[in-house]
Amino acid sequence: MVIGITGSFGSGKTTVAKMFGRLGAYAIDADKVYHSLIKPRGNCYKKIVGHFGKDILGKSGRVDRKKLSRVVFKDKSKLKLLNNITHSEIIKEIKRIIKSKKEKVVIVDAPLLIESGLYKEVDKIILVANEKEEQVKRAREARGLSAEETLKRIRMQMPFNKKLAFADFIIDNSGSKTKTLTRVKEIWKKRGV
């Protein structure tokens, strides 16, 4: 069984995915797959540099993700271009990883699970929810982003209400980690393993 986990930026998707991992699932982080594809030998590197120029590169010749983010999160058309370059490659790599795993349950932690079309490759979808204030706090602590930068990224994603229509399960991640883990365990039992 393949379960997709999604939610808005800073909602705690990765925390939830790790909880499923501790219960025995194999977790795939779509962001890590993306990072591997934009490395100098990765499948998306040349196209990204070709479209966005060498200004997005760091001194080592690698894509500087902060520089690239500043470019694409200022302009929706540039974000769309980046997504067009990367989404099909990310999906292809995730499908390859899923096929190679022997675990009964594979978790795909993907912020753009629905927007990218990756949701078509999963059996169930979990939507992680929490308050915007908490999302801003998490983004500041984890990535050093300002409230303005975080809210801009949230606004560029599919609205939460639209994601709800795709969800099989919802995890409210605005409380304690213990409360979130309790909900994760409930879902783990419901899926029959």
Image (tube, helix red, strand yellow):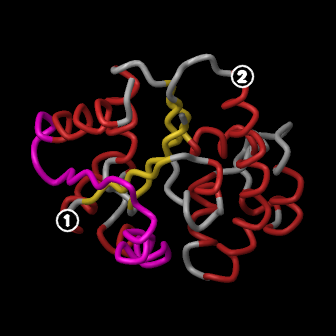
Amino acid carrying label 2: it is: Ser
Tell me the residue that label 2 is attached to: 100
Task: Tell me: 23 left or right of 175.
Answer: right
Say which of marks 1 and 2 sits in front.
2
Which image quarter: residue 43? top right
Q: Residues within 10 Å of mark 2 (few under 14, many from 20)?
A: few
Quarter the C terminus occupies: top left
- Relative image position of residue 107 (x, y in whole percent): 49, 36
In the rendered image, the vertical position of residue 101 relative to residue 94, given as above or below: above
Q: Quadrant of the N terminus?
A: top right
At numbered mark 1, what does the secondary structure look like: helix, strand or loop? loop
Up the image or down, 54 lies above or below 63; here it is: below
Q: Is residue 131 magenta?
A: no
Counting residues from the start of the chain, the first of labels 1 and 2 encountered is 2
What segment is highlighted magenta in the picture? 152-179
Q: Which residue is mark 1?
A: 131
Q: Is residue 177 magenta?
A: yes
User: At which x and y percent is residue 103?
Assistant: 55, 19
Looking at the picture, which amino acid does disc 1 mark? Glu
Q: Classify residue 180 by image quadrant.
A: top left
**Picture coordinates of residue 162, whole percent (x, y):** 42, 77
- Residue at the limit of the structure toward the front, as seen here: 192
Q: Nearer the viewer, residue 171 or 85?
A: 171
The residue that appears at 10% across and 49% down in the rendered structure is 175
Q: Nearer the viewer, residue 137 or 20?
A: 20
User: Would residue 9 be found to the left or right of residue 59 on screen?
Assistant: left
Mark yes or no: residue 147 visible.
yes
Kindly tell me whether residue 139 is visible in this rendering.
Answer: no
